[in-house]
Amino acid sequence: MNVLIIGSGGREHALIIKIAESKKVNQIFISPGNAGTLQIGENVNLNITSHSEVIEFCKNNLIDLVVIGPEVPLVDGLSESLRENNILVFGPNMLAAEIEGNKKFSKELMDENNIPTASFKSFSKSQFNEAIEFLESGSFPIVIKASGLAAGKGVIITENILDAKGAVSSMMLDSIFGESGNTIVIEEFLEGEELSVFAITDGDDYILLPASQDHKRIGEGDTGKNTGGMGAYAPLNFVTDELINEIEKNVVVPTLKGLKDKNRKFNGCLFCGLINTKEGIKVIEFNCRFGDPETQTVLPLLDGDFFELLYSTAKGKINKDAVKYNGGSSICVVTVSGGYPDKYEKGFEITGLENIDDESTKVIHAGTILKNGKVITNGGRVLNAVTTLSKNSLSDCKSICYNQISKVKYKDIYFRNDIGFKA
Ligand code: AMP
Ligand code: GLY
């Protein structure tokens, strides 16, 4: 089988490593990919916004399955363009992808289906004054979210009325997130341990992959600005069988049913961003794709044929026995360019990759590019060091991972030293 993967991050490099393990897979293409993906597949440069260009590539290269990594092409309808042309794809259609691309829709779906989430109210641009009035009667902290896609940056948690009004104005009047902030959701602040759960689903049936936890903030102790994700680990010791049952019963099952009832059947990875509150599990957000960096830490914990899981799902009947949790543990530490998530420089040579000499540690590439035989930094998040052990021992994973990553160098390298601290 020939596979095309869309994307260029650590998530996509991790996906192709796992897909390439399948005996069924011959050739892997990735667009645009990075310096890591070209060690396994062929990097190609497709214009993803041109659906006809992607379709033509798939036809010319006899692609059996397309896997779409990031949310933007999903929300943009690349999946249905491919499906309309009889090309098999893992990833939801545009209307189902709205569960991530349109937070107002997502919150209303939860409301209609009694799916536990923060209480909320949404406002369109013409309701700016109502939004401000609503804040005046609200309690703090309060959470303000751009309804549309904002590359993970569209959430502002505010501690007082002044900051809250500022956040609403910046989204609705100053358009800091462009059109994505034309509609906003204002919601209750929830407290508890966060977890990411991926449901792989054909729209009717599903399996859950092991739960993981991501570290979104730039600074140690979960402080400072939000980022795409500075590291992740799995499994989580607080996730019991009872909690998984609760997640399935109260979140996954009603969400899939709710989407299907609206003719928005979801085929792909439904990413449930959850929080374990005193009142039980609640949804922080849904994403229509695999998480990054959670994918890097979850996939090494699967035995079996991951390609078969995605392929059977894309064909419409998930093979629930294709993979299973192998009982291990894994940690992923992300290295970034100095200055990230604000302004940063790129174009620095990365050295020391050849010094990684531990079998349980893999370097997954994100913002890297190969130039004249050298690996060069090419983005904010640059590398992911992933250490996986066959036993459940996160503390061992952690010490090995940090020992290995310290061998890699580039100008202004930064990473958090406390990934997995809550474990
Ligand atoms: P999101 O992009 O929706 O995942 O939000 C980014 C981060 O903001 C989440 O991982 C949470 O840490 C935080 N967050 C979002 N919504 C809430 C909420 N209602 N209560 C508390 N924290 C939240
Ligand atoms: N790690 C969070 C995300 O992928 O959105």
Image (tube, rainbow, N blue to C red):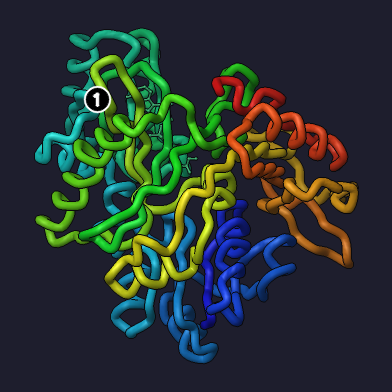
Taking depth in this image into account, of 258 and 316 the one nearest to the observer is 316
Q: In this view, does 94 lie to the left or right of 198?
A: left
Q: Is mark 1 on a helix, strand or loop?
A: loop
Q: Is residue 365 left or right of residue 297?
A: right
Three-letter amino acid code at disc 1?
Ala
Q: Where is residue 49 in the image (x, y as percent from the top left)?
A: 45, 69
Q: Can residue 319 be seen in this view?
A: yes
Read off the residue under disc 1.
118
The residue depicted at 20 percent of the width and 39 percent of the height is 249
Q: Position of residue 244 (x, y in %)?
A: 32, 36
Taking depth in this image into account, of 255 and 186 the one nearest to the observer is 255
Q: Is residue 173 visible?
A: no
The residue depicted at 62 percent of the width and 62 percent of the height is 17
Where is residue 113, by image quadrant? top left
Q: Residues within 10 Å of mark 1 (few under 14, many from 20)?
A: some
The residue depicted at 33 percent of the width and 47 percent of the height is 100
Q: In this view, does 396 lie above or below 55?
A: above
Where is residue 286, by image quadrant? top left
Q: In this view, does 58 lie to the left or right of 114?
A: right
